[in-house]
Image (cartoon, grey):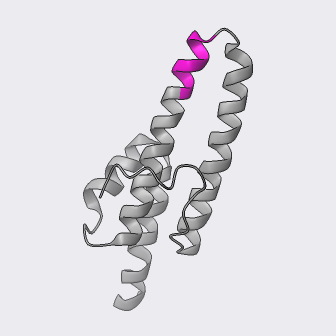
Amino acid sequence: MPDYLENVQEPKTYAVCAYITWIGWFCAFFLRNKNSEFTTHHVNQALVINILSILGGIISRYAFLGQTISTIIDALILVVWVLGILSAVRGNTKPIPVISDIKIIQ
């Protein structure tokens, strides 16, 4: 593969990996180019989605209407997760609604 294609594919690979499990997120976080705004954007969004997923699980376990809340939260997280992966595959840094304002990784 020519070098110029490798340079374009690498950030996309890390961005997509960030959305796939915590292991993928850690790999993307530590292996990414720190100067790549594209990869940093997607690593940040994936982290926010993962944290929201954990919080949703905790809320659904201890909330009065746990099963209903859990179903709604899981559906919303699935939609946001798919939007994030599609954005990474397309090479966009289009912010995902609701979570785009949360910046954990600068």
Q: Is residue 43 left or right of residue 74?
A: left
Observer-nearest residue: 58 or 21? 58
> Considering only vertical position in the picture, is 1 above or below 41?
below
> Considering only vertical position in the picture, is 77 above or below 40?
above
Residue 2 seen from this side:
no
User: Splitting the image into 4 quarters, where does residue 6 fall?
Assistant: bottom left
The number of discs equals: 0
> Considering only vertical position in the picture, is 93 above or below 106?
below
The C terminus sits in image quarter: bottom left
x then y, percent, for residue 33 = 27, 69
x then y, percent, for residue 16 = 49, 60
Of helix, strand and loop, which mostly describes the magenta segment? helix
User: Splitting the image into 4 quarters, where does residue 70 fall?
Assistant: top right
The N terminus sits in image quarter: bottom left
Instruction: Give the residue displayed 57% in from the left and 59% down from the top.
Output: 85
Q: Is residue 57 magenta?
A: yes
x then y, percent, for residue 91 = 53, 75
Q: Is residue 58 left or right of residue 8?
A: right
x then y, percent, for residue 14 = 40, 63
Q: Which contiguous range is marked in magenta? A: 56-63
Instruction: Give the residue displayed 36% in from the left and 71% down from the top.
Output: 37
Observer-nearest residue: 97 or 1? 97
Instruction: Give the residue displayed 45% in from the left and 60% down from the top.
Output: 42
User: Splitting the image into 4 quarters, where does residue 5 fall?
Assistant: bottom left
Q: Is residue 32 left or right of residue 23?
A: left
Q: Is residue 43 magenta?
A: no
Residue 72 seen from this side:
yes
Instruction: Give the residue displayed 42% in from the left and 81% down from the top.
Output: 8
